[in-house]
Image (spheres, rainbow, N blue to C red):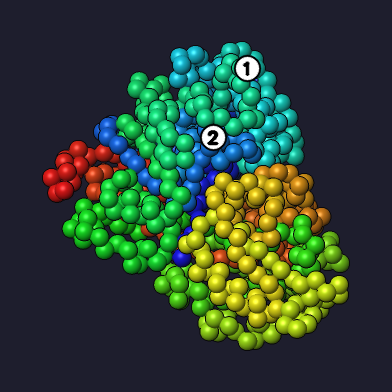
């Protein structure tokens, strides 16, 4: 089985708003704070030395190299913040931000490029004072003008993910060269200010001579722990650690970014990528394919201990991977058609026969989180749903919908019979073995794929669809074409993954709001356009308490499930990692992140043993 990577355009993002405890009140009715968090107190007090999950004495040096994603990847641009192009991974390493995420808390961020923060009494204005002496990699100073430019350009010209977050950023005011004020509308959600504070800072002077909204293979000017040093388009990118970097000894950075060189390897073919790992062409991989994990780790370096494997817990909400059905296309607009398609997928057979029983079925777009709907609606959920009773299905008010469980045969007759009934109700009848509408047009569908490891999961699915008289097929394209077609919504059914910040809010707009249905590059791949869903998304986006957020997301979950917009895949609450044994790492990993490579380090003695064992 293949599970898609959780990489996300908002990798530096953190959900949340002002933490429960603020510092002393200031003369202008502002309060100082060293961190922001949506709900509850901050874990780390003012003046903390480091995060608990790092080794502050970790040595610097050596090389870390890894496979990007699970293979089948490429890149043609270093601009990771716009719709155009396929951006190189890990470009966040090259940028600093006002605040940085703590990955052992659900959503907390702490001061990074900013040394001071004060917040207005109504929590609509956030005043940041930049640290003295901070600079971009060319030596030019980072100023408040750069911060203002960055937020404004991301809002106006960045990827829709940023537009969804920054919609309530009403103004950015530069008070002096080191002081900038972020102002938010009264309707802004709790997650918005920290998300804005954790976005990258760009050089205004650098982009005065370049177009921000265009792709480029010129490594951008950054101010982070690393800079791009060498690359070959579509094959590899090397990042070199910035010596004497201004942020190295800050509490939010101490014990992290320990490798002198960080290298991302790209392979268009998964098999070639795996063979490259066995030959030590790169040193670390996260495994996403259950077949490979179960059967392929029998090569000599693994048997003699030079290559290690670990299963480490993943306590984050798992997100939700699945087949997204493009409802922009007329043939998929009827919910009954979409439900019938889903009934043809036999998860139980697939999990047992193709995935070694490693997974559990995904049910919700908020899987493995407090936002996931369960059982009957609560009173708070009902209060949100009741005004729309005449506009949503009765099932929304009962036990939450769950994907059907098959008999595991691969062709459950009961489920296929029900699928046929739904298709007939929707006006699709069988004629000469073909499922046709009143005009005699056959129901067809094409699954868009960019690599063949998913082919075995589609074959029995397609067989069942053909039993129903539906002409289904696979279309293989290269990763660049797949990305472009998804950005242009040029597909019938495509695989994607819902991944939000730990505390979702405004980010949900990009996935479910009707405003993003026709916005190129948005994550609303299914084309969801429902006024009720729009209202519930906004309820979540502007929630003022944890209880309000959870209720809004659960109500939203119920309505989304009733729409059958996607066919859920599967999930597991762990990371499968494999690596050549030349690294050290802390005993405790951050609760809400993998921790690799940020907290790992190079151990020369181990590396020397590997060389001797060749």
Q: Residue at x 76, y 47 (%)?
A: 518
Q: Which residue is more in the foreground, 268 or 113? A: 268
Q: Where is mark 1, residue-wise?
A: 208
Q: Which residue is more in the foreground, 547 or 484? A: 484
Q: Quadrant of residue 129?
A: top right
Q: Quadrant of residue 595?
A: top left
**Can residue 549 be spotted in the picture?**
yes
Q: Is residue 272 left or right of residue 610?
A: right
Residue 31 % position (x, y): 60, 27
Above or below: residue 152 compared with residue 596: above
Q: Residue at x 57, y 18 (%)?
A: 206
Q: Is residue 309 left or right of residue 509?
A: left
Above or below: residue 181 compared with residue 490: above
Q: Where is mark 2, residue-wise?
A: 77
Residue 412 % position (x, y): 60, 84
- Determine crowd level at label 2: few under 14, some 14-19, many 20+ residues with C-alpha closer than 10 A: many
Disc 2 from disc 1: Cα separation = 19 Å
Above or below: residue 393 compared with residue 116: below
């Amino acid at each position: 089985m293949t599970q898609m990577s959780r990489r996300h355009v908002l990798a530096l993002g953190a959900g949340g708003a002002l933490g429960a405890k603020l510092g002393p009140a200031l003369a202008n009715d502002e309060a100082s704070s060293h961190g922001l968090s949506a709900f509850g107190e901050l874990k780390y007090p003012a003046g903390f030395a480091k995060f608990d999950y790092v080794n502050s004495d970790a040595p610097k040096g050596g090389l870390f190299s890894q496979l990007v994603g699970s293979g089948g990847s490429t890149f043609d641009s270093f601009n990771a913040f716009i719709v155009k192009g396929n951006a190189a991974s890990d470009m966040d390493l090259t940028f600093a931000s006002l605040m940085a995420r703590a990955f052992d808390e659900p959503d907390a961020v702490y001061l990074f490029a900013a040394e001071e923060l004060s917040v207005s009494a109504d929590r609509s204005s956030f005043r940041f004072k930049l640290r003295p002496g901070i600079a971009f990699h060319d030596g030019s100073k980072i100023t408040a003008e750069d911060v203002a430019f960055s937020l404004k350009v991301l809002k106006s010209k960045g990827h829709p993910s940023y537009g969804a977050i920054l919609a309530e950023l009403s103004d950015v005011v530069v008070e002096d060269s080191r002081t900038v004020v972020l102002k938010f509308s009264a309707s802004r959600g709790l997650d918005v200010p920290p998300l804005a504070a954790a976005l990258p800072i760009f050089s205004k002077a650098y982009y005065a001579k370049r177009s921000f909204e265009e792709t480029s293979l010129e490594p951008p000017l950054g101010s982070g722990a690393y800079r791009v040093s060498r690359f070959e388009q579509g094959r590899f990118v090397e990042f070199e650690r910035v010596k004497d970097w201004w942020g190295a000894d800050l509490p939010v950075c101490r014990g992290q970014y320990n490798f002198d060189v960080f290298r991302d390897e790209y392979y268009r073919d998964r098999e070639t990528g795996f063979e490259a790992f066995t030959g030590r062409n790169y040193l670390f991989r996260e495994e996403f394919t259950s077949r490979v994990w179960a059967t392929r780790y029998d090569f000599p370096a693994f048997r003699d201990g030079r290559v290690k494997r670990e299963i480490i817990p993943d306590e984050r909400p798992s997100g939700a991977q699945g087949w997204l059905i493009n409802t922009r296309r007329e043939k998929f607009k009827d919910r009954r058609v979409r439900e019938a398609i889903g009934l043809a997928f036999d998860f139980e057979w697939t999990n047992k026969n193709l995935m070694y029983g490693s997974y559990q079925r995904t049910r919700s777009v908020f899987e493995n989180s407090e936002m996931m709907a369960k059982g009957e609606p609560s009173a708070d959920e009902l209060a949100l749903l009741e005004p729309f009773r005449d506009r949503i299905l009765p099932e929304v008010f009962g036990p939450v919908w769950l994907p059907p469980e098959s008999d595991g045969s691969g062709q459950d007759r009961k489920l296929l019979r029900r699928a046929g009934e739904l298709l007939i109700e929707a006006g699709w009848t069988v004629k000469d073995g073909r499922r046709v509408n009143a005009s005699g047009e056959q129901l067809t569908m094409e699954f868009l794929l960019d690599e063949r490891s998913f082919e075995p999961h589609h074959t029995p699915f397609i067989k069942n669809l053909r039993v129903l008289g539906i002409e289904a097929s696979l279309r293989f394209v290269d990763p660049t074409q797949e990305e472009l077609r998804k950005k242009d919504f040029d597909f019938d059914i495509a695989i994607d993954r819902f991944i939000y910040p730990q505390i979702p809010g405004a980010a949900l707009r990009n996935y479910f709001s009707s405003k993003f249905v026709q916005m190129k590059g948005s994550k609303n791949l299914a084309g969801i356009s429902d006024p009720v869903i729009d209202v519930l998304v906004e309820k979540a986006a502007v929630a003022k308490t944890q209880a309000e957020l959870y209720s809004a997301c659960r109500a939203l979950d119920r309505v989304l499930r009733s729409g059958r917009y996607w066919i859920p895949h599967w999930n597991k609450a762990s990371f499968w990692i494999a690596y050549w044994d030349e690294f050290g790492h802390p005993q405790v990993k951050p609760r809400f992140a993998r921790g690799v490579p940020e907290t790992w380090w190079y151990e020369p003695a181990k590396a020397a043993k590997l060389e001797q064992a060749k």
